[in-house]
Structures are given as structure tokens and as C-alpha cells.
Amino acid sequence: MEFLYEYGLFLAQAITIVVAILLALGGIIGLVSKQKSGKGHLEISSLSEKLEDLANYSRSMLLSKEQLKKFTKEQKKAAKQQKKTAEDKPAGQLFVVDFKGSMDAHEVDSLREEITAILTVAKAEDEVLIRLESGGGVVHGYGLAASQLQRLRDKNIKLTVAVDKVAASGGYMMACVADHVLAAKFAIIGSIGVIAQLPNFNKLLKKSNIEWEQHTAGEFKRTLTMFGENNDQGREKFREELEEVHQMFKGFVHEHRPALEIAKVATGEYWYGSKALELGLVDAIQTSDDYLLQANETKKIFIVKYAIKKNVAERLGLAASTMFESITMKLWDFQQKAGK
């Protein structure tokens, strides 16, 4: 009985909190509905310093005092020599940008800011590494994303793309722009193809005695429709449009990787990293982590990120989501105890 009492008390408190949240949201809904998303800001952090801090901590935990003292002495000597070498021939800097693309490729809004920022300071000896992860999406979105990377090539800034998980379809459209493409052994690469699909509810509407009207000006203003009755002429035109996009996709890839047997790889298939290397879709099997550790020996590495500030509505949504999740977990915990 005591447990049931506690459970009921908690449930009442939870309901009270939820009601209070809903009332508060209702009171400011007019304000947040009019508020636009806040502008973002550029963040630049040193990955080299982070790696150095990690190495120093590891050495302090694993080496004896004598070993640590000897290592420090050797490092100072190496640093002097490196400084002298750097004066003769600058090693340059490595800028790292993360791109994790969604279906609509809205992340390109941040990418264009990051690329612009890099171009304002980058020199000929510098390099940009894109840590890319995307299964593709809309053609125009990924076309713009690929064009943003092309801006680096146009300015003769070395561009490397590292694929640890997946760069397929629109993702590979971006990757192929790079001077050098890296892939993890089991990363998914390729899918040079085009797909489009949509349901048709015309029969269901007819069965429910619902009429659907659509009026257009132009023979092919609309080829296929979700609610009207489609015909063979519209289907054929739709396929022609898909094939046209596919030809553009193949031409784009072949332009940037002319050694590829484009007919062999542009079938819509995807391959894992090792096979992708054999086919010439990538240039090396290596993770971004290994590449960065190697580069850190000669370059200073900086992560460039354009962070978009969340508005009040988005912050409230996140807070409410966190609170609801907490309440749900507590209720689940009570139910588990009640079951016992």
C-alpha cells in the first residue's frame, strides 16, 4: 500500500508538471511562433592542442619520473629543430570540417559558412579535411554541397575527404570532388544512381467517392501525381528526367575522377571500402583518426564549425523533451517495482 501511495503521489506530481509546461508554452506561443532562428557563429578550436593534452596525460600516467624527464628534454630539442625547419619551409595548417548530411542536405548552410571562413585565411600550403558522412538525398542540395567543396579546389587548396561510415549517392557526389579520398575498410561507398518514388492514392479516392482535380499549364508541368490518375506518357517523361539527372551525376563523377570506369561503377550499386579502392572510387584505406594523427606530426590542426544558435522555441522544445524523457523513465521504474 505504501508503494501504491508513492506511485500515485509521483503520478500526480508528473501530471501537474506536464500541465504547467503546457500552460507556459501556451502563454508564449505567440512570441516564439514569430521568432526566427537566431544567427549562427563560427567556432575554431585547436585539435593539435587537444591531441597534445591527451598525449601529455597518457605519458604522465605511464612513464616514470626519469623517463618523463628524458622525454621532455628530447621534445625541447626536437621542437627547436622543427622551428628551424618551419622557418625554411612552412608545413601549413590543416582545417577540419565535419559534414553529416541528411536527406534534404540542409547542413550545406553551415558548410558554406565554414568554407568561406577557411578561404579567407587559407594559404597555398594549407589543407582542408572533410570528415564526410552521408547516404545522399535531394539532388539540388548535394549539388550545392559539392559546389562548396569545389570552391576549395578552385583556389588550389588541397582537399581531402575521409569517409569513416558512408558516402553514398549525394555523399559520393561530394567526396569525388576531393584531391584525395580516404575510406575506412567497411565504409559504404558509391551508389552512383538516382531514385524517386511516390505513392498513388487515386484508387482509394475513387473507392471513397472522392474526386481529385489538378490543373496545369504546360504539357509536362506535372508528370506523376499522388492523387490523380497517372498515365504511361507521364511515367515515361518521369523516367527520362531521372535518366537525365543520372547522366549529369555520371558526368560530374567522371570529370573529377577520369580514371574511373564510369559505366562499371555508375550502376546504383554500393561497395565497402576495400572493394571501392579496387574500383578506383577511393584512393586509400585509412580512417580519419589515423590521418589526423599522422598530419599532426607536421601540421597544426584546427576544427572549423559554424554553430547555429537555437531560438527560444527550439530551446524550449529540447528542455521539454528532456523533462518528458526523465518523467517517462521514472514512471517506467515505478512500474518495474510494482511488477515485483
Image: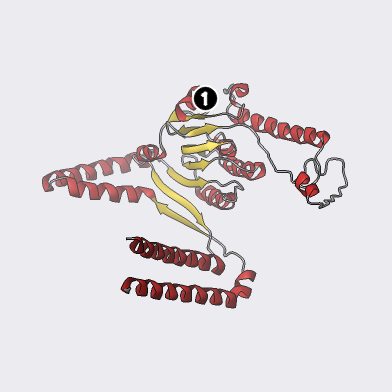
Q: What kind of element bears circle 1?
A: loop
Q: Which residue occupies the foreground of this view, 227 or 215?
A: 227
From the viewer's perspective, tell me whether residue 194 is left or right of residue 97: right
Q: Residue drawn 53% across and 63% down? A: 309
Q: Position of residue 215 (x, y in %)?
A: 86, 49
Q: Where is residue 308 in the image (x, y as percent from the top left)?
A: 53, 59
Q: Residue drawn 55% across and 40% down? A: 135
Q: Which residue occupies the foreground of this view, 39 or 33?
A: 33
Farthest residue in the front direction?
A: 1
Q: Residues within 10 Å of mark 1 (few under 14, many from 20)?
A: some
Q: Where is residue 307 in the image (x, y as percent from the top left)?
A: 51, 57
Depicted 111 relative to depicted 30: above or below: above
Q: What residue type is labelled 1?
A: Gly
Q: Which residue occupies the foreground of this view, 281 or 302?
A: 281
Q: Where is residue 264 in the image (x, y as percent from the top left)?
A: 60, 22
Which residue was labeled with disc 1?
Answer: 280
